[in-house]
Each structure stands twice: as C-alpha cells, then as structure tokens.
Amino acid sequence: MCSETVVSVKNLSKCFQIYDSPRDRLKQFLLPRFSSSEKKYFREFWALRDLSFDIKRGETIGIIGRNGAGKSTLLQIICGTLSASSGDVVVRGRIAALLELGAGFNPDFTGRENVYLNGSVLGLSKSEIDNRFAEIEKFADIGDFIDQPVKSYSSGMYVRLAFAVQACVDPEILIVDEALSVGDIGFQYKCFKRMEQLKKQGVTIIMVTHSTGSILEYADRCIVVDGGKIIIDTEDVLAAVLAYEKGMLKSQVAIEIESKTHSEDSIHSSSDLKKLQQSEQNTNFNEKRFGTARAIIRKLDIIKSDGSYFNESPVIRCGEEITFRLEVTSSEDIDNVILGISLSKAQGSDVWGDNNLNASQPLHLKNGTQVFEYQVKLPISPGEYLVHCGLSCNVHGEREELDQRRPMEQIKFWSARNQVGVVFAPIKVLQGVEK
C-alpha cells in the first residue's frame, strides 16, 4: 500500500436549509435583497460538522453509521456532486462512483448508449470505451437489454450495468454507496470479487454499507459516523463494528423488553397467541411468519461462549461455541414438539440446521412459557447469516406447523483468517514431510 494521500478532508461541514413551506423559501430569496432585516425563514440542519481525515492510495475504507448520519452527504462532496458549506476536500485520481441507483443514466438512452455516455464523463475516449465494452457487457450480464432503453430496466439491471461501467474503466478511486444491496446474491459476489481485483491493483475503495459483515471481510479501516461527526476512525475494523452494532441494538432491545412486559399478562388462549404471532415480526429482516399459533416462539437470545449476549457484542468468532436460547409460549399442553433452528445466507438456502428430534431429545410443552437452549459450535466462514426458527408437532402422524419464523434474527461471524466457501476449516501446512 502506497503512503500517498489520494483523498484529504479538512474541517468539512455541510449545512442544509430546511423550509417549512415554499412561501418561506420565496421570502428568504426576496426579502434580504430589499430590506436590512436579518430574519431567517429556514431552519439549519448540519449534515456534517468539522470532519477531517486522509485516505491513502490502495486503502479500502468502510464507512458505517445509522440512517441520517451523514455518510451519503460525505461521499457526494468527495465526488464533487455536492458543495461543502465550509472546509476543504482534495482528491487526487479519477473517481468512479456508484452513489445511487441509475445516477448518470439517461433513461431514454439504451444501455449501450449509456455505457458510452458514462465512459466519456469519466474521461475515456470512444476508442478506449470500444476496447472495454465487451468486458462491461459481459460483467453486466443483462443480455439483449443492453440495446433497450434503461427506463425499461428493473432495479437489479440498473445496478448491474452501473457497477459494470464504474468497475471496468480502470478507476483510481472507487466509491460505492449501498447500491449493491439491490442486486441478487450471485451478482453481489461477482462485484466483491471485482473489488478484490481492483484492490490488488492499488485502487482506493470507499464503501458505505449497512452490511457490517462486508466491512469486516473487505475493509482495511473503518470510519463510524454519527450525527455528522466522526465517532471512530481506526484500522481495528472489528472494534469499530462492535461499537457501531452495540449502539444500534440498544434501542431495539429496549423495545423488545417493553413489548414483552405489556403483552405477557394478556396471554390466555390460542387466539391471543395468534394476535401476537401477527404483530410480533422482525421488520428489519422482512420476517415471514405463519402457523396455527397454539404455541409460538416469543424470543430468541444468542449467547456467546464468554456468557455475553450477541446484542451486547454482535460479532461471533468462527468455531466459537454459542447458545441459542428460545422462549416458547403455549396455550395448552402439547406433546411430540419439534423445535428447529437454521442459518442461511441472504436470498439463499440453509447452510446449517438442526432440531431436537434429530438430537433424539423429545420436547413437551406445558401451558405457559418455557425456555429451551441449544448449544453448538458452528464452523461457519466469516459473513452475515440469517437465523430461522420453527416450531411444529406431530398429531396422529400428521405434522402441524405451530410457528415458523423466517428469518427471526441476523448473526455475524468473523475471523482474521480468510477462506473461500461457507465451511470454516483452516488448513495446516506441513513442510518437508517425508514420502
């Protein structure tokens, strides 16, 4: 990695003027010109306040923060599409930026025409774009739609073509702002592989994403932004992610505790549980939930090997023993219960799963609330996984779905040791072994 600074941000601030009505905007435009009044007809919103940092050539920087923290505003100023209120930004190198879906595309142009339009904006000649076009078309993989107007594209096709253009024009600085989240998991994998190639070539990469698993896997350094200020700027990416996740989860845990306190006393029958089943869903992960609701899964806690809860320290080391603690509430006594748990990648099939029936451990529910614990060591490679839980029973040889929750939670695994695939099984290299 070169020590040359390619992005320098000094005392950067950005203030937006917020108007309550179009009339106030007109007053602010006209009245100061014709009177000495200093009255302001807007409210100030400081998206960024006094940010300073440098980025070296070849670094991969992850920028994380809650919605409204100022991340996108920062990237727009670095790219030059937004002006700062104060401070300086110096950029050395050609920037390729994927800031928002379809940015820079003319909706009436075909995909092919937009490739040439974007390439020229990035400073490439027609002959240079000609030489790269086959690579761009292959990477985007949108077939005959390359010659159709982009206004007919789906969101996935938009991002495929946009990323293909930005990543295949030999950028010196690549900026990606959450846009890849709309792509399917196969295309996301292709994009990250391309970013790895660019990184090896010495390209500086700045990525903004809510996927902290991607930050852990790819970033050399992490900047946490909150309220328009830099809270953390460190090469200890794991520490930055832990601090960010812990702050984000505090309010979520408080809401869950309050909900449980208010609803527990009202549980009397299956109809009560049915109402809870319909109302208690994890909207953060678009949870799908169904079942007869004679019994339901109320809560899932993930406990690490040191006794700490996942929401206190939200990253698990690969191969670490963890405990899934499930709280189940039943409206009646139910025999022959199957309580299962599984993990999957986003938009993918399960990569692991087990239940008490496979473990030859029968479970019986009693009227009321019970807690069950499953302990397991998961040799899972680093990344983000969705946690699914299911509750069913056998009635006269027929399976009854009581409560299926897909997904109920998200879990993150981390290791300093990089591997390919899903199974975490590091090799041990022996040298000089006799035949």
Image (cartoon, helix red, strand yellow):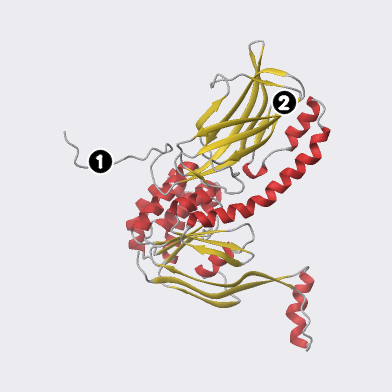
If the image is split into quadrants, where does the N terminus sit? bottom left
State the image coordinates of residue 121 (x, y, percent, origin top left): 45, 66
Looking at the rendering, which quadrant does residue 342 occupy? top right
User: Which residue is under mark 1?
Assistant: 430
Distance, label 1 to label 2, CA atoms, is 53 Å
SS of the residue under disc 2: strand
Q: Position of residue 99 (x, y in %)?
A: 53, 59
Q: Residues within 10 Å of mark 1 (few under 14, many from 20)?
A: few
Image quadrant where one finds the C terminus: top left
Residue drawn at point x = 38 percent, y = 42 percent: 420
Q: Nearer the viewer, residue 313 or 94?
A: 313
Who is closer to the viewer here, 389 or 143?
A: 389
Q: Mark 1 or mark 2: which comes first in sequence?
A: 2
Label 2 CA crowd tier, 10 Å (few <14, some 14–19, many 20+): many
Residue found at the far bottom of this picture: 36
User: Which residue has dot 2 on it?
Assistant: 295
Kind of residue sitting beneath label 2: Ala
